[in-house]
Image (tube, rainbow, N blue to C red):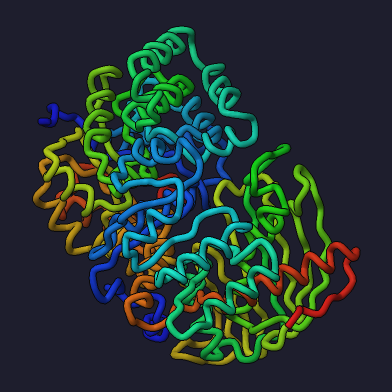
Amino acid sequence: MSASRSSAPGRLVALDAHGAASALTPHEAARLVDAALAAEPGAVLLRPSPAARAILAEIDRRVPVVAVLPDMAELLREAADRGGARAALARLGRARPAAWLRLALTAVRHLPTVAQQDFRGLVPVLIELERAGLQTAALQGIALAAPLTDLLLAAGHETCIAHVVQFIRRSIGVEAGLETLNLGHLLTRLAAWKIAPDFVIGPLNPTGFRMKPSPGAVLDAVRRAPVRVLASDVTAGGSVALASAIAHARTHGAAGVVATLDELVSIP
Amino acid sequence: MLDLIRLAPELQPNVGPLRPVRVGIVGLGRMGAVHAAVLSTLPDVTIVGAVDSQPGAARRVRGMGFRFPVSATLDALLTDQVDAVWVCTPPDSHLAVARRCLEAGAAVFVEKPLAHSLEDARVLAELAAGPAARVACGYGFAYWPTFVAARQLLAAGVIGSPLRAVSSMFLSQLSGPQRGWMYDRARSGGGVVANLSSHLLFLLRWYFGMPISVDATWRQVHTAVDDELRATLVMPGCAQVLFESSWCVPGYPISVTTIAVEGSDGSLQVDNQQLQLDLRVPRCGLGAGVTRIRDAELPQPAHFYFNGEAFALEDAHMLRWATGGAPPPITAAAGLDVQRIIDALYASAAQGGDAVAVPP
């Protein structure tokens, strides 16, 4: 599978705010994103939490969005509390009727694999379900969230990863990415499987934080990968200055970098 | 100080089985799938099969991409010459499954808690005390870098003698009535303490030794088991430890565990993300004052990251033990100790908060 000509952004601002940025109002957070993207054009990286959606609502609607889907932890928690059907309906309630139709079509197209509980069918339906509630007009790309990517990677579910990439690219019509916390493992397997998503998001930083299987193996895999790598965890949990962390990632072959709101607020 | 932390056996790099091993998994719920994923990535490990009595289990794990065979009974797995078995079934079945695995000569990793009752836990620990037996219990905080670092520093006396501690573990797991084995005391052995914050009890025992007595109160908010529990533990290595846990508070999408220890020469505070010391006197290469260590600064030796470092490390260390290496800190004996504390907490709570001695 060859990669499409990708325009994956060079800079992404993730609307994740677990530390210092969690004290910001959505408006203040949005202005921080605006400032960061004014300094260097890029996109917003969105995980569909209520807090992130509130910030997104305050951001210029023309700013490109790359969504990381699905939020499995939130989905499972809601399903446990309210039941799977009500958790799904809550997402559809935020969507336009066109999104309901897309979800229905996706479910019908994947019916045989869904019936077999095969993730080749389940993951596209989950992505479509989460996309329905995104409320963004400027979706540029979708990355499969790390918990699912890494589960499929560990299980060796090559056909599912290939199918998800094709589904995002062809059925949704946006760039297809994979988020991982095992960057070296994933890039190596993608090469062996001849799967080329438009981009991969994974940890790359000067201290080796979360670089699996080892910092050296990750740097080597990134250097050799035909896939565009967007570096995450660039400041290694705040232990490296953001500017030098970004420079480090780019020096080592990252096509783009992800900075979180927390990093923008608290790391010079 | 970081050199001291790097000496921790739990954070050594390149740990794994000392020879190629064949492993099996019993129970393919959430924890079974997590261990299947982690074990699939470890070098020299082959998952030869799994067991689950539910009809859809085989289809479910095949749907994730796993290709190992799944059978409905333990016999098929145990005739396949397995070196080690991961028992990820509800706690009321741990003893029966582990006993058969041990009889077949396999090492056994039992997900926490060790059993649903103190009686079962005692029998299992007794079986595990056999000369060739290897039984571990899944208290993964023993491999969580910040918590390992805290143990190293406490053991080195960095804050002097611990005087008192405040500890908590919170998770927003439920906000309404629930069904399933985890909320059925007869199957799970209890609620938030047995199924979640027994992890924290493991840490307290690891840091300060076995409590002498406890007093506890509990609340049932959404389920028929303890949804919240508050307790005081009197411990030999720290005069008094406050303990609080809930799985129905908002604001904790991921569980957060915190321990703050006041010592004779300073204080230490640790959580899942970082560790902070405030020393009154220079010690272990640190000057007086506040020092903060983030998890990113600690060793991260796991080969594969899945829900953190700990799962990969605990499985790797278990397999090293199963193949002749050193025992991990999460042996069945440690699991039994935690079960004794759980039993005392529940006994005290059931008596309205009276002080209860931890059973021998």
Q: Quadrant of the N terminus of chain B?
A: bottom left
**Camera-side residue of B212 and A210:** B212
Q: Position of residue B76 (x, y in %)?
A: 38, 53
Q: In the picture shown, does residue A24 fall above or below B80?
A: above
Q: Seen in the image, is B240 located left or right of residue B298? A: right
Q: In the picture shown, does residue B264 fall above or below B219?
A: below
Residue A141 in view, yes or no: yes
Q: Seen in the image, is A255 located left or right of residue A123? A: left
Residue B297 is drawn in which quadrant?
Answer: bottom left
**Residue visible at 75% across and 51% down in the picture:** B225
Q: Seen in the image, is A22 located left or right of residue B213? A: left
Report the number of numbered marks.
0
Residue A268 in view, yes or no: no
**Residue visible at 64% across and 35% down in the picture:** A81
Q: Position of residue A26 (x, y in %)?
A: 54, 34
**Camera-side residue of B272 and B301:** B301
**Camera-side residue of B206 and A9:** B206
**Residue visible at 90% across and 63% down in the picture:** B352
Q: Position of residue B16 (x, y in %)?
A: 30, 71
Q: In the picture shown, does residue B350 fall above or below B269?
A: above
Residue B21 is drawn in which quadrant?
Answer: bottom left
Q: Quadrant of the C terminus of chain B?
A: bottom right
Q: Position of residue B211 (x, y in %)?
A: 72, 81
